[in-house]
Image: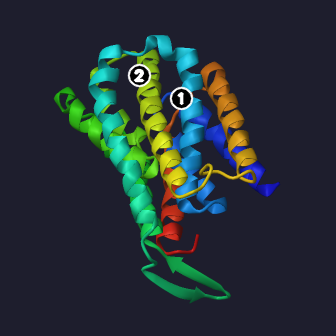
Amino acid sequence: MCAFIIISLSAFFVSGLTLYSGFGLGTLMMPVFAVFFPVPIAVAATAVVHGANNIFKIILVGRHADASLVLRFGVPALAAAFLGACMLEYVSRLDPIATYSLGFRVAEVTPIKLTMGILILSFSLFELLPVLRTIAIDKKYLFVGGLLSGFFGGLSGHQGALRSAFLAKMAVSTETFVGTSAAIGFLVDMTRIAVYAALFLGAGKAFFLDSSQLPLVATAILAAFAGVIAGKRYLRTVTMKTIQAVTGVLLMVIALSLGTGIL
């Protein structure tokens, strides 16, 4: 029951409060899932929730998406997401780097946990540092931005922060920004979900989520939907600075816990 409460509340609040920032759901939900699932499964579960949430956002505001931006940024992101997802599978099979005792608990530092910890710690800076919150990169680098965002999206699910940094330079309306981000995020999510599923099938598993994990993922999806509705109706004027600061601190704590093998 505790897992359902934590995951549903996290999905609801993060989905609603990050609707207009263009990123945040995957950044926070992956480590939340990692508390209850193995890290590779947590990444895959987050992809399912993130993808479903993007579909819902497309239904609500997809008509405002800029087709040119989706093609210029989304196509390279899609290709790079494939490589990132394959890299996740490779890293997850590497042997532990170190083990140590922490009281009555044996902590294990694995390459996948260390990688995720470093990535989460890095992306938490986008939430904490004002200079990174407002960073906007020249539009001539959209192709490179798509590659970077897609690759990290496939590897760890952290695609939105980079995507927002690049798309912010386009000076589009809020509706166009949200719709375009949702469309690009959907392309990356569908690519990595397909790769995750194919890799698990190749390993002789029917699906990357078993029957005990599916209810938690379904709960997160429904809670994220509710968060989008609440965000669209009531939270448009809420300042994101406090939310970004709190999220950044939480991400740093989770990153250090993952990287040191505590989680």
Q: Nearer the viewer, residue 131 or 122?
A: 122
> Circle 1 is placed at which residue position?
54
Instruction: Say which quadrant the C terminus sits in.
Output: bottom right
Q: How many marks?
A: 2
Question: In this picture, is 174 found above or below 255?
Answer: above
- Can residue 85 be seen at all in this image of the molecule? yes
- Dots 1 and 2: beta carbons under 8 Å? no
Which label number is shown at residue 224? none
Look at 68% across and 44% down and name the residue there: 217
Place of residue 52 in the rendered image (x, y in percent of width and height, measured from the top left):
59, 32
| SS for dot 1 | helix
Given the image, on which type of amino acid does mark 1 rest? Asn
Judge left or right: residue 64 versus residue 170. Answer: right
Place of residue 69 in the rendered image (x, y in percent of width and height, measured from the top left): 31, 21
Q: Quadrant of residue 112?
A: bottom left
Q: Residue at x 63, y 61 (%)?
A: 35
- Considering only order in the chain, which callout, 2 or 1, is on the residue closer to the N terminus? 1
User: What is the spatial separation of the Cα atoms under label 1 and label 2, in whole angstroms?
Assistant: 10 Å
Question: Farthest residue in the right direction?
Answer: 1
Q: Kindly identify the residue that appears in the image at 31 percent across and 22 percent down.
A: 71
Query: Could you say where residue 3 lies in the image, as x and y percent from the top left?
Result: 75, 55
Q: What's the residue type where badge 2 is placed?
A: Thr
User: Looking at the picture, how far across and down is residue 128, in whole percent?
Assistant: 42, 50
Q: Would you call the spot at circle 2 few (<14 residues within 10 Å), some (14-19), or many (20 or more)?
A: many
Q: Nearer the viewer, residue 65 or 129?
A: 65
- Residue carrying label 2: 180
Secondary structure at numbered mark 2: helix
* Residue 38 sits in quarter: bottom right
Q: Is residue 240 above or below residue 173?
A: below
- Which residue corresponds to the image point at 53% horizontal and 87% vertical from the top-left? 100
